[in-house]
Amino acid sequence: MTTTQITVTEQAQKELIGLEVNHEQFLRLWVEPGGCSGMSYGAAIDEEMGEGDQVIFENEQIRVVADPESVRYFDGLTIDYTDDLVQSGFRFINPNAVQSCGCGSSFSCDSCG
């Protein structure tokens, strides 16, 4: 099994904790076809691990989980949060993406997995 490494910035961690993400209520990430660049990120707060789910980030306060089909897209991913006036919210910065849309919610990837 390959170990996926992601980074969750301090600001993103604070926002996730504010949304009551922890170890019991973890952040679930997935990738699905769609968006203007081919693939879209999805995220939700979840409480149940599925078969094959992998923990891709964990520290003393929060845990991030991905399903086995999506995990290959997340290696090297950085989750950030910005509260600027123009485009506030969570941002996914993926070094494997060869193309991203302007809003950062979709991407394409030639070398993932």
Image (cartoon, helix red, strand yellow):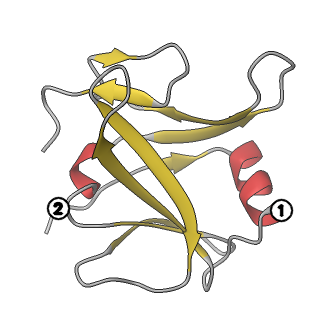
Residue 18: name its quadrant. bottom right
Q: Is residue 29 visible?
A: yes
| Residue for badge 2 | 2
For badge 1, the amino acid type reads Gly
The tally of labels here is 2
Residue 109: name its quadrant. top left
Residue plotted at (46% across, 50% down) = 42
Give the quarter of the figure containing the N terminus.
bottom left
Helix, strand or loop at disc 1? helix
Question: Marks 2 and 1, how far apart in space?
Answer: 31 Å
Assess disc 1: are there few (<14), some (14-19) or many (≥20) residues with their C-alpha within 10 Å of its C-alpha.
few
For badge 2, the amino acid type reads Thr
The residue lying furthest to the right in this view is 85
Mark 2 or 1, nearer chain start: 2
Residue plotted at (72% across, 59% down) = 16
Q: Is residue 51 left or right of residue 29?
A: left
- Considering only vertical position in the picture, is 22 above or below 88? below
| Residue 17 x, y percent position in the rendering | 77, 65
Q: Is residue 95 visible?
A: no
Residue plotted at (71% across, 55% down) = 13
In the rendering, which numbered label is found on residue 107?
none
Helix, strand or loop at disc 2? loop
| Residue for badge 1 | 18
Give the quarter of the figure containing the C terminus.
top left
Assess disc 2: are there few (<14), some (14-19) or many (≥20) residues with their C-alpha within 10 Å of its C-alpha.
few
- Considering only vertical position in the picture, is 69 above or below 47? above
| Residue 10 x, y percent position in the rendering | 72, 47
| Residue 58 x, y percent position in the rendering | 52, 69
